[in-house]
Image (cartoon, rainbow, N blue to C red):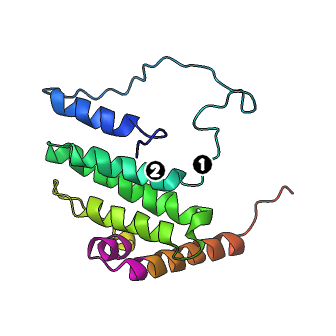
């Protein structure tokens, strides 16, 4: 199945394999294409896709399979970890351990077990990531669910800023 939403990820990783070195710059050079007609001709980011999260994780895995350099593989794995920790678990999809969530967890398991340079995890996230890496998908789901619940509780209890 062709991934139309995130086909740029595998393409760029294949491109990285063909370059002898990559120079990172803080200067952002890009051509901005204004495309903001969500009704008549929406862009891919404006279109509603129920499987958007799954498509992104699939694209990361597909791109990772094309990686030769262990440092680039490490960066892709870190991106997958960030995406899981900050996007996937905050999505509406993360309400129960559905078949789509199971597929996402399986893909993440394959991504996290892909050979790369060593990644240092923070202690608070290591339990979730290591559970996925070891194949304890239900445990990872429960750990993430409790972390999100704790975060929401903290946000609720935090004093609100008020103007006096």
Locate the C terminus and report the quarter of the image it occupies: bottom right
Q: Is residue 132 magenta?
A: yes
Going by the image, does 65 lie left or right of 48? left
Q: Please determine whether, in this image, residue 164 is positioned above or below residue 25.
A: below
Who's the residue at 43% across and 71% down the image? 102
Going by the image, does 89 lie left or right of 129? right
Q: Secondary structure at mark 2?
A: helix
Residue located beneath label 1 in the image: 49
Which is more toward the observer, 44 or 72?
A: 44
Who's the residue at 70% across and 75% down the image? 157
State the extent of the magenta-drawn residues as a range. 127-140
Who's the residue at 45% across and 19% down the image? 30
Q: Residue furthest front?
A: 1
Q: Position of residue 112 (x, y in %)?
A: 27, 62
Q: Position of residue 152 (x, y in %)?
A: 63, 72
Q: Residue furthest right?
A: 164
Q: Position of residue 67 (x, y in %)?
A: 20, 43
Q: CA distance from mark 2 to mark 1?
A: 9 Å
Q: Is residue 163 magenta?
A: no
Residue located beneath label 2 in the image: 55
């Amino acid at each position: 199945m062709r991934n139309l939403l995130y086909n740029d990820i595998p393409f760029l990783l294949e491109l990285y394999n063909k370059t002898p070195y990559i120079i990172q710059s803080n200067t952002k050079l890009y051509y901005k294409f204004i495309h903001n007609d969500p009704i008549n001709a929406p862009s891919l980011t404006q279109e509603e896709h129920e499987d958007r999260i799954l498509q992104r994780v699939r694209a990361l895995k597909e791109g990772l399979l094309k990686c030769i350099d262990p440092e680039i593989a490490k960066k892709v794995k870190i991106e997958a970890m960030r995406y899981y920790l900050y996007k996937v678990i905050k999505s509406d999809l993360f309400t129960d351990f559905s078949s789509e969530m199971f597929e996402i967890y399986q893909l993440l398991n394959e991504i996290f077990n892909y050979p790369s340079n060593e990644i240092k995890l923070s202690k608070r996230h290591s339990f979730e990531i290591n559970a996925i890496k070891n194949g304890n998908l239900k445990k990872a789901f429960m750990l993430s669910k409790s972390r999100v619940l704790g975060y929401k509780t903290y946000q609720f209890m935090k004093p609100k800023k008020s103007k006096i």
